[in-house]
Image: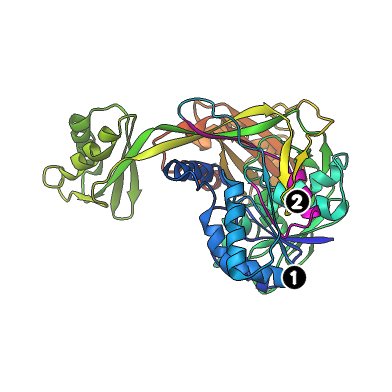
Amino acid sequence: MIRIGNASGFYGDRASAWREMLEDGPLDVLTGDYLAELTMLILARDRLTDPALGYARTFLRQMEQCLGLAADRGVRIVTNAGGLNPAGLAAALHSLAARLGLPTTIGYVEGDALDQRGPSVLAANAYLGAFGIASCLTAGAGVVVTGRVTDASLVVGPAIAHFGWTRDDLDALAGATVAGHVLECGAQATGGNFSFFTELPDGGRRPGFPIAEVHADGSAVITKHPGTGGAVTVETVTAQLVYEIGAPAYPGPDVVTHLDTVRLTQEAPDRVHVSGTLGTPPPPTLKVGVAGLDGYRNAMTFVLTGLDLDAKASLVRAQLEDAVGKDGLAFTLTRTETGALLHAAIHDKDPKRAGRAFSSAAVELALASYPGCTLTTPPGDATPHTVFTSDTTPQSPHWAIHPDGSRVEVSPPARTAPLVTEPAARPTHEPLGRPRGPVGTRSGDKGLDANVGVWARDEEDYRSLAGWLTCERFVELLPEAAGHDVERFEMPNVRAVNFVIKGVLARRDWLDPQGKALGERLRARIREAP
């Protein structure tokens, strides 16, 4: 068994988590995921100002305290904090280790960066697999840095190195992929962002970070250090399992993981056994993440109180449209207990129009608009609007740079198979009405698509959920999905139904640009439905 922890789910996660995970209990490997799709855009913009950047600088600051601590405790570190410049982060770590007097051995993986695919493209990176990480660990690396790999690869790579799996061990690779998918977003597996957070022992105040005890067959136990907050239950793991997925056939560079074969069992308090996962050969192509520029944007928010809220909002809208023109303007009116907030946003290819021309026009209304006119911020410049899209590229070699400096080719899988995506499922259960009890949800982004996973708390409610929540009813309950193709997939093994809303995140006027709140909105509307 190998015990693998997580200390970061995104760029900006809890700064103290690395030290806490190292001090609070035993581990073999500690991983950190920094590369949400949004992060690649942030790093691409960093690299525009300084070509030496492009990696997660907060990781270096965290290693100031933790590089020696990890070595003292025999814990290896694996992270994708290398972002767009893994060689640069590896060099910075070498300098840090030398300054601290530590004999740290460092390897890194490269080969994900592709030629840019257009004048507005900032970066294009293939999602690599886990065998490059495994190669560096087998060569003795105490720290492994990657660029763009699949998030789950941070867990799969150490398991490959520990157990000696080959590319033919598809079920084991799939099982470890599930463990990696559960761990990749940190505290989301232990009660963070959990629909039933009020039921957690600490009310969800400070969930601990997750650990996977991975076994030779790819099965795993998800747990956390004793005494840390939150909880590990079948439902907290289910919530993360349905996060940012599409069809149950979950494609990766090393294996297609069939999420509808996963079995979750509560083995003991804060210990969930994950087993039964089946894997099939990976597709012949890799996913490519493309970070690009898409003009400039800005926003100002007006506070509306008292009477005639709609008329006040209409006045501001007309005044701003007269001042800067209608093109690219969008308005969102959000009711509050004391009135409303009017969020005025602009998107334009001209940074001057989207910048001070817009924000100053908003401020100039302070004495010339609705009674009680108030804004929440002073005028500001526009910021570049970046967009993340996906593409594919054929599987091809990449490279593991070992601690001794040797550059080792990592060959692509010899056996691949075209990805067969199951057709969107019609309900397989009779319509029995909406579930009687509350359901759980979790939603997120996949490029310009959003997914909403919905799970029931018992079998009876799952039968109701699966028969009642059709694509048509989903759109009725969540009008934000109207006008978009919606795919539906059933996962009876975890009592869940997953929906994918195609292209919905291309909208520029949303206050929820990554779709993180879609699930909770749907959950409330399910409860209110007749």
**Residue 67 versus residue 165: which sits nearer the camera?**
67
**Residue 364 versus residue 63: which sits nearer the camera?**
63
Residue at horizontal 40 percent and vertical 37 percent from the top: 385
Residue at horizontal 67 percent and vertical 40 percent from the top: 497
Disc number placed over residue 26 in the picture, else none: 1
Mark 2 residue type: Cys
Q: Is residue 192 above or below residue 111?
A: below
Q: Is residue 437 visible?
A: yes
Q: Give the magenta part as a residue range.
A: 121-146
Mark 1 residue type: Pro
**Residue 98 versus residue 328: which sits nearer the camera?**
98
Disc number placed over residue 136 in the picture, else none: 2
Tally the numbered discs. Answer: 2
- Return the x and y of residue 502 as percentages of the image width and height: 56, 30
Earlier residue among tags 1 and 2: 1
SS at mark 1 in the image: loop
SS at mark 2 in the image: helix
Residue 127 on the magenta segment: yes
- Return the x and y of residue 300 as percentages of the image width and height: 28, 44
Q: Is residue 55 above or below residue 390?
A: below
Q: Can you say which quadrant of the picture contains the N terminus?
A: bottom right
Residue at horizontal 53 percent and vertical 42 percent from the top: 40
> Quick one: label 2, few (<14), some, or many (20+) residues within 10 Å?
many
Question: Which of labels 1 and 2 is toward the front?
Answer: 2
